[in-house]
Amino acid sequence: MITSRLLVGLVRALVGAHARWIGSLPSARQRIYFANHSSHLDALALWSALPPQLRDTTRPVAARDYWGQGGVRSFIADHGFRAVYIERDREHREGDPLQPLMDALDEGDSLILFPEGTRSQEALPLPFKSGLFHLARRYPEVELVAVYLDTLHRSMPKGSVLPVPLICTVRFGRGLHLQPGEGKESFLERARAAVVELA
């Protein structure tokens, strides 16, 4: 789509979004890419770093209260990278908050997910929330790929309207799966460690 190509060109002009496949290779298999979260550009940078054929089937998970409120942001989310919206506001949430993600996975799409649940000013991720664990348990056939987004916490930190043009490297690490009998806390710490080792 023209919108997607323009979006990728803009992101790469602003922050580079250069891919480095360190622990895995691009693959058409269904995946959940999970990464550190420090900027509103994170989803766009990671999505833009994927090869074109993978971008067509990979959908970033986006907060409805930021990306889904109409205007330019919603146009980008809906027509640029086909966001999967998640409802962060408990008052507006109906049913399982992971249902939109499960619907996308059931349709065969891959996802981009930020397990911290919110942006951080730190270079390393905060402890992960439980959503990644529940998806890993429900979809054992889906490969989980750790990703580290470098410099975006300095390019467009909280409160910034426009990004500072710094070159961002998107490092793709090794794939993970939930191990038999593995508990939530140990899995989430292992997943977080996989992102940290790419920093």
Image: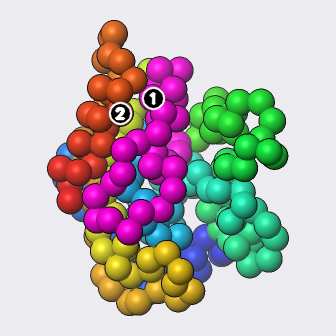
Q: Do the residues under discs 2 and 1 have CB atoms within 8 angstroms?
A: yes
User: In 3D space, how far apart are the residues under numbered discs 2 and 1 (Cα atoms)?
Assistant: 7 Å
Q: Is residue 27 visible?
A: no
Amino acid type for the residue under numbered disc 2: Leu
| Residue 121 marker | none
Amino acid type for the residue under numbered disc 1: Phe
**In screen coordinates, is 8 left or right of 169?**
right
**Residue displayed at 72% across by 50% down:** 89
**In screen coordinates, is 7 left or right of 77?**
left
Report the span colored magenta.
110-139
| Residue 188 marker | 2
**In screen coordinates, is 68 left or right of 109?**
right
**Residue displayed at 35% across by 27% down:** 185
Task: Give the structural element (helix, strand or loop) at label 1.
Answer: helix
| Residue 133 marker | 1
The numbered mark, 2 or 1, whose residue comes first in the sequence reads 1
